[in-house]
Amino acid sequence: MFEDTSLAQGTTATLKSIAELNQLETRVRRVLAMTLSSALRVAVVRRGEGPGSSFEVTVQAGATDHRFLAGWAGEGWPGDVKEMVGLAPGVEVALAANLSDGARDWLARRGIGWADEAGHAEIVRPSGLLISREPGSQPSRAAQSSTRWSRSTLAAAEAALSGTVPTVEKIEKATGLSRNSTATALHKLERLGFLQRPRALRGPMSGRQLANAEALLAAYVDASADQRSKSPKLLVHRLWVGDALETLRTEIAPALNATKAKWATTGVAASILLAPYLSDVTTLGIYVDMDLFSDKARLASRLGGRIVERGQVIEVRPLPTPTTATGPVVEGIHIALPVRVYADLLSSGGRAAEAAQHLKEVRRIGSGT
């Protein structure tokens, strides 16, 4: 008997497409966050689900809403922007990884604004929105696109973005990394242009400092998403007691706390506890240390559920860094560091990405304080 796999293949392709669109939406939001002032509120709504998808953007400045249609032009070569405009006619602002001079000229001749992940921007809207940026010193295209960070580099970035001064001594203490791993991680972040040393070579001001917190945050989000996509995960189904947050507070958190293991919740549930924006939790995201994660059957039992291949309401992953579980504790619920929650929400896309923007504003994520 031959099995018809066409439906399964079609479903897999659809899921892959949805994941790619969510990732693209995350990049669109990140470019806008890098380009616009942190005092402005930005809403992004995806329009369309296939090639040529565009994004309705609303920038709220005081009592004025500036609206425009944005499209993604890939790497940013002239051929990329021409293809984007052909697939999504009516686009008013082109976004890309790093727009070439030729691509910018082509867009300018057609009255289309632009912005890219390198921090360049030229957007002029009839509503009065005027953005013009030409950074003097930015990490190279290769540096910005590199998401292959080690666990120690992610931990160092996580700590620095959470307010730890990026010196070897303080990052080592905050992360629990070895002295060598800490020094290597900070050297990489400095080489990529995210950290810098002041001119003083001695004294209290001689250590590294954040060169561009927004750029580091954007790179950290990319690297976190890459790490998350490769991370093993345990899918669990169970019945809620009331709702997901109530079950987390009354049953799951006490069960995990009893193990004395390190753990933390992330995603929408964590965002509700840190900076309420969404109200419903469809899937509970939890990180646990590797010792607890290694015995999956026992872990699922502690969570009060059973292991499934689909239809999960809980997703469990190993702790991505030593610092992830050092966030606040609310009513016995351990919450991941806000910067990690922010990155995970962006990776999910949709309404979760909106919650990420709200969390960023409320918790001042990326400010280095």
Image: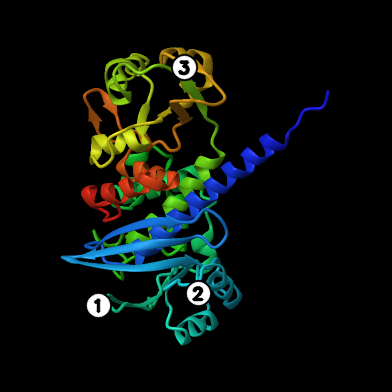
Q: Residue at x 67, y 34 (%)?
A: 8
**Tag of residue 145:** none
Residue type at mark 2: give it: Leu
Q: Is residue 308 left or right of residue 275?
A: right
Q: What residue did someone put label 2 on? A: 99
Q: Residue at x 48, y 21 (%)?
A: 236
Which secondary structure, mark 3?
A: helix
Which secondary structure, mark 1?
A: loop
Q: What residue did someone put label 3 on? A: 299
Residue type at mark 3: give it: Leu
Q: CA distance from mark 2 to mark 3?
A: 47 Å
Q: CA distance from mark 2 to mark 1?
A: 24 Å
Location of residue 284 in the rendering, given as x and y in whole percent from the top left corner? 39, 29
Location of residue 307 in the rendering, given as x and y in whole percent from the top left corner? 52, 18
Which secondary structure, mark 2?
A: loop
Q: CA distance from mark 3 to mark 1?
A: 55 Å
The numbered mark, 3 or 1, whose residue comes first in the sequence reads: 1
User: How many residues crowd around disc 1 within 10 Å: few (fewer than 14), some, or many (20 or more)?
Assistant: few
